[in-house]
Amino acid sequence: MHRGVFLNIFLTIAAITLLLDWYVFSGLKTLVSDWQSQRLRQIALWCYILISVGVTILLLLDVGSFSTAKGMTPIHEWLLSLFLIFFFTKIFFVIILFLGDTGRFLYGIGDHIIHSERKAGEPFFPARRKFISEIAVLVAAVPFTGFFYGMLKGKYDFKLHKQILYFEDLPDAFDGFTITQVSDIHSGSFDNTDAVQRGIDLAKAQKSDLFVFTGDLVNNAAWEIAPYIDRFSQLKAPYGQFSILGNHDYGDYIQWESEAAKTANLEQLKQQHKKLGYRLLLDENVVIEKDGRKISLIGVQNWGRGFIKMGNLDKALRGVDKDAFKILLSHDPTHWEEKIRHNPTKIQLTLAGHTHGAQFGVETGNLRWSPVQYRYLDWAGLFTENGRNLYVNRGFGFLAFSGRLGIWPEVTVITLKRKEV
């Protein structure tokens, strides 16, 4: 997104949140109106103004640095996350307060119609009742505490997702073959090295036959992964470690001093994959052989609907037998939607990431919801169509919002099983 467009959008949101502050402030005044100590009333109201409005102002002062060569650092993300927490908390507060004020308005009109003769000085609308503000605070406390949990705990609450997939055309030697998938590390966002190691240890403990990483190693710059190379290089598998690039790996979301600097960053990032012990697949394929039988592992550069269409599937498939069992690594699930599920060449399994599940949502029983579903048809977990399977990893790391709530960071283990005809 162009820096000017981003700034205009954020200024609009900032203006809205300042209006919300004005309305919330009026509700808080009602809440503390019967406190005996005037000093405590003033302290409470000023604390709200200083914290809520202060976060907005600090973010406005800092927003210009988001697109600089360093991009969004953990400090930037914490500041943005605090802004978002207050923004959504205020919306919940305002909804309840507005419903209460609407009731006052309707009551006042009705009372005026019934009692057309009013005493001089008698208010047209009844005063706002304190319990409405109390309800507003209780309702607003739900997103407030939830999102804070997501920032403090949820973003490192790694979950293991296991999936068994059956294929009639899987070579018999690969019956029971396991793949550990990690995606969207976004190393530039990490702020707790020990917590990151817990996720790595979870992936190591699976002892899978193959390890794959499906893109977005960094937020923008190659240097972001440097402090974690010794840690993520611990991820080894008997049949190798393979990786691809994601949309953030190209450095398109920050300003570079020159095109040459941007190109050099991408070359450095490719070398970081090598240091990690990952074979980076750039629109190419490799053969995985076991007990004399083979499957094809294919990796494409990022291909996303609407942006960064670098991947070349036709090139990546060169030399692959049309009857081979194929596993494709492709960062963005829209590639599967647009190019793979109806492709003349059957690709049995595609592994993707990218969506993060929006880092916010609900997954319980049969209920699955995330705001990201309005952008992506396939946004988390397994999807099957036309004999082709897509698995979308929810992501290991996080970006922009320094937290996760309901959509937890994921390590995936996929077991391939042969289905007897």
Image: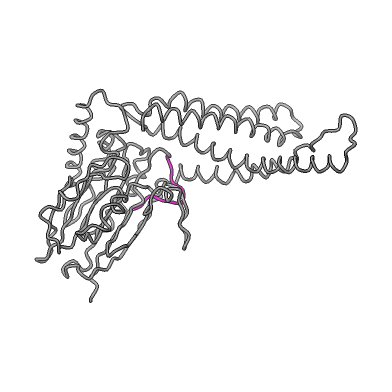
Where on the picture, by quarter, is residue 97? top right
Q: Residue at horizontal 73%, vertical 27%?
A: 38
Q: Quadrant of the C terminus?
A: bottom left
| Stretch of the chain drawn in magenta | 402-410
Question: Would residue 359 appear left or right of 328 to someone viewing this image?
Answer: right
Q: Nearer the viewer, residue 366 or 387?
A: 387
Residue 42's spot in the image, x, y percent? 68, 27
Q: Residue at horizontal 17%, vertical 70%?
A: 172
Q: Quadrant of the N terminus?
A: top left
Residue farthest along the bottom direction in this orientation: 421
Residue 369's spot in the image, x, y percent? 46, 54
Where on the picture, by quarter, is residue 78? top left
Question: Would residue 335 appear left or right of 322 to someone viewing this image?
Answer: right
Residue 341's spot in the image, x, y percent? 28, 58
> Please, is residue 363 above or below residue 50 in the view?
below
The way the protein has been coloured in the rendering is one colour
Q: Is residue 405 magenta?
A: yes
> Please, is residue 23 above or below residue 132 in the view?
above
Q: Residue at horizontal 26%, vertical 58%?
A: 342
Residue 28's spot in the image, x, y percent? 67, 34
Q: Residue at horizontal 75%, vertical 38%?
A: 128
Label count reads: 0
Q: Is residue 253 magenta?
A: no
Q: Label the magenta part by its dominant secondary structure.
A: loop
